[in-house]
Structure formats: C-alpha cells, structure tokens
Amino acid sequence: MPPRSADGAVSRGAFTGVIRWVGGALAVMWAVMSFLPKHATSRSS
C-alpha cells in the first residue's frame, strides 16, 4: 500500500492542476469578452 502522504500529494497536485486549468480558461474567456465586446454582441444577436 502506498503511503498516505504520497496519495495526498498526488491528489493535491491533480486538484491544483484542475484549478489552474479552469482559472486560465475563465481568464481567457473574460479577456475575450472584455477586449472584443462588439464581436461578442454581434455574435449573440
């Protein structure tokens, strides 16, 4: 059986990776919406 510390480190690393990926995706979407409001508006309508 692997030690709990190693399992916790792996879980923590995976959790951090997911948070970074989601945060990055949201930041990119926010940047696109902020810098290209005309494109987003014309696309919606």
Image (spheres, helix red, strand yellow):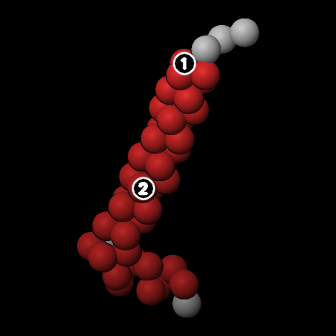
Q: Position of residue 14 (x, y in %)?
A: 54, 34
Residue bearing the label numbered 2: 23
Q: Residue furthest right?
A: 1
Give 39 or 33, whichever is nearer the viewer. Answer: 33
Q: Are marks 2 and 1 in contact (CB under 8 Å)?
A: no
Seen in the picture, residue 13 relative to 40 is either above or below; the reply is above
Q: Pinpoint residue 15: horizontal percent, then vertical percent.
A: 53, 41
In space, the residues marked 2 and 1 are separated at their CA atoms by 25 Å
- Residue at x 61%, y 22% (from the top left corner): 4
Q: Position of residue 37 (x, y in %)?
A: 34, 82
| Nearer to me, 40 or 4 | 4
Residue 29 visible to the viewer:
yes
Q: Secondary structure at mark 1?
A: helix
Q: Looking at the image, is mark 2 or mark 1 earlier in the sequence?
A: 1
Q: Residue furthest top?
A: 1
Q: Which mark is residue 30?
A: none
Please tell me whether residue 43 is drawn above or below residue 24 in the rendered image: below
Q: Give the left or right position of residue 34, taking residue 9 as reference.
A: left
Q: Quick one: 41 or 34, which is closer to the camera? A: 34
Q: Is residue 21 visible?
A: no
Q: Is residue 25 above or below residue 7?
A: below
Amino acid carrying mark 2 in the image:
Gly
Residue occupying the point 53% across, 22% down? 5
Count all numbered tags in the image, as a single digit. Answer: 2
Residue 40 is situated, as x and y percent measured from the top left of the image, at 44, 79
Outermost residue toward the bottom in this view: 45
Q: Which residue is mark 1?
A: 6
Q: What is the three-letter code of the residue carrying label 1?
A: Ala
Q: Quadrant of the N terminus?
A: top right
